[in-house]
Image (cartoon, grey):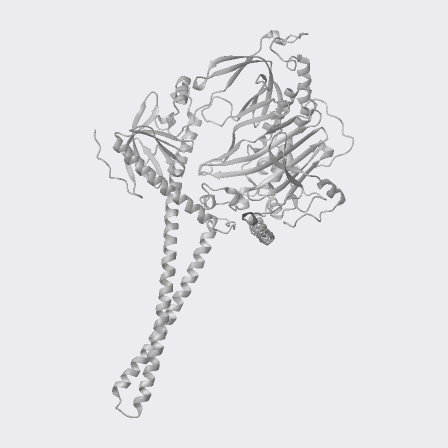
Amino acid sequence: MSEPKPPTPIPGDTYKGWLFKWTNYIKGYQRRWFVLSNGLLSYYRTQAEMGHTCRGTINLATANITVEDSCNFVISNGGAQTYHLKASSEVERQRWITALELAKAKAVRMQLESDDSGDDCPAVPPTSGQGGGCRNSEIQSTLRTLSSKVEDLTTCNDLIVKHGSALQRSLSELEGIRVGGDMGEKIRQVTERATLFRITSNAMINACRDFLSLAQNHSKRWQKALQTERDQRIRLEETLEQLAKQHNHLERAFRGATVLPPSFSNPALGNKAGVSGKGDASDEDDDNEFFDAMEDPAEFITVPADPKYHRRSGSNVSGISSEIGMDDQSFDELSLASNPESPQPLELEPVRQRRTRIPDKPNYYLNLWSIMKNCIGKELSKIPMPVNFNEPISMLQRLSEDLEYYELLDKAAKCQSSLEQMCYVAAFTVSSYSTTVHRTGKPFNPLLGETFELDRLRECGYRSLCEQVSHHPPAAAHHALSEKGWTLRQEITLASKFRGKYLSIMPLGSIQCLFDKSNNHYSWKKVTTTVHNIIVGKLWIDQSGEIDVVNHRTGDRCHLKFAPYSYFSRDVPRKVTGVVTDKDGKAHYVLSGTWDEKMEFSRVMQSSKGENGTEGKQRTVYQTLKAKEIWRKNPLPEGAENMYYFSSLALSLNEPEEGVAPTDSRRRPDQRLMEDGRWDEANAEKQRLEEKQRTARREREREAVKAASPPDEGAHQDNHHALWFEKLDDPVSGETLHVYKGGYWEAKDQGSWDMCPDIF
């Protein structure tokens, strides 16, 4: 059936037509109706579906368009969505490519203009129920200017009427007089009034010219802003519609579905789709209408080891290293060390009782979209947010929460084997995410120079210090020292992007752990945190990605994989797997569990290549001893759901303490007001602190410009220097990070804080 040829695309026009879209190996290419409008490419099964059911949409602003051959082309936005399309002819394909490139260029240009207009806005937090305060203030200022010009025009009009009437009377009188002595006087009056009329008319013309110029200039800006708002509203409405359908479909599937779609129940088909890279079957089955997710098969499998490995032997089994050849009794000792029921040493001195409750979270309403609608695609650390989105602790305190399971590092410090020690360090790495499972609130962004100390020397044998060492980009340095023989240091910079459907938080930087006794030096990085259901449904957190924990002294390595959550996965949610290998790549331990509950480790006795996995690769089969629990999450305190889901440690972090530095997060007034439930006052105080920080930064920039002789391009950079940390190159890991230079605890003992800046 032949279709009429669409016209050559014109920039800004909506473009529609039939294309063939790859679905899967069973159905191949299927004919679909595509619509290109407002920088979005959407498709439907038929034209009749356009009014009610969209099968998929891709934003061209972030998409790549690739031509494969004469009729085929591919549109991808970086992995989340990929459309393999085929036109009926080469001419038709070229028409679509032209239309897509024009639409993409326009979408990118509009996004850049939106970003530029957002950057020009003063960073004032919008009040509850009100968004776009920057744009509103600009419009009000323009309206006031135009109103003053209108008043000038009104005044000129009154004067023209007055002087015009006087001139008319003078002319009438001039016509009625006879030539005589009064002639000269009348002519003088007419000349004077004509002059006044001419002056007033010129003023009127100038005022009209100014008004017209202002109106024309602002008209262009308003038209562009209005068009941007319209396009953004259309995109958000379409995204909201898709997410609402997805949410309803998931609820129905969760409540009533007992059979998975064929593409998920047949592993062979799933593997083929993985090979092709075209497995976007999001519209082909009613049961799988709005989803592209596929289960990611495990890279390895474990089976119980042969019974001969469980028998004690005086010699090591061939192929097993001496470190792995220890008997089961040594593992029983490790298990005892990780058993919470094992006897603990008695405390010789009473320790301070920490608080176990904070005021319940108020139930304040906030229009989420009044704030988030202007944040799509932007860096959230540069956008002021009301405290309604926060939890009453700072990012420095959140960073200190990584030490909740410090016992894992205490046990690691006692290990004789570096491979066993790696297991505990890896478990500690996973444990730091357990506090995030219900924590959808955003920590307070620390002010530049803000600090936080966590002194648990008497209770737990360690103490730590955090400092905000940079503001743009925001970066925090952390140093923890334990009496048990380990040191933890990290420097983390958070990058975040709001994508409409979800919020991604990408921690940048490195974490290092050093052990005094063995001189082992470990380093690793963090995975990406994603907040889902920003628009529709209940917010939930997921952790996904891979971590390589490296022992730089021995070359040992642990590769951890955080599996992204999938509604259709047969695995347990929030699964984490890992393999500990030596410098030669030989596996010695396998770790498995979940980042929100527990981790187990088991000793590898033998490994072999097993069945084929994805992409034709063979999965490794590890024969292991019985798994032993190495870490388990502590239960949340009673009533945690009303206290921001804080753990017992988190509840104590913002508890007031005497003797801390004046820059300590506990002294931050907006954070304290929020904890007390006084959110309106907290928002006002947060705005004051942010403005104070901006003023201090401008002052530092002015001083840097004065000090620069001759001026150079670096003179306008923020020349802040951290108080307790210094930036050094680590010769072991080869990384550059802020390292604690000492002096804080000595200053605390002396009560001397004169060097601390006034930031609150």
Q: Is residue 299 left or right of residue 8?
A: right
Extreme-right residue of the structure: 348
* Quadrant in the picture for residue 217: bottom left
Q: Is residue 585 left or right of residue 59?
A: right
Residue under the point 41% across and 63% down: 147
In-front residue for pair 384/76: 76
Q: Is residue 693 left or right of residue 238?
A: right
Query: Could you tell me if residue 309 is visible in this image?
Result: yes
Extreme-front residue of the structure: 710
In-front residue for pair 706/449: 706
Instruction: Report the label total.
Output: 0
Residue 349 image point, x, y percent: 78, 33
Extreme-bottom residue of the structure: 181
In-front residue for pair 150/714: 714
**24 is higher (above) or lower (below) than 665:** above
Quadrant (top left/top right/bottom left/bottom right) for the N terminus: top left
Residue under the point 28% across and 34% down: 94
Residue 388 image point, x, y percent: 54, 44
**667 is higher (above) or lower (below) than 550:** below
Query: Could you tell me if residue 260 is visible in this image?
Result: no
Residue 724 image point, x, y percent: 67, 41
Residue 630 image point, x, y percent: 63, 22
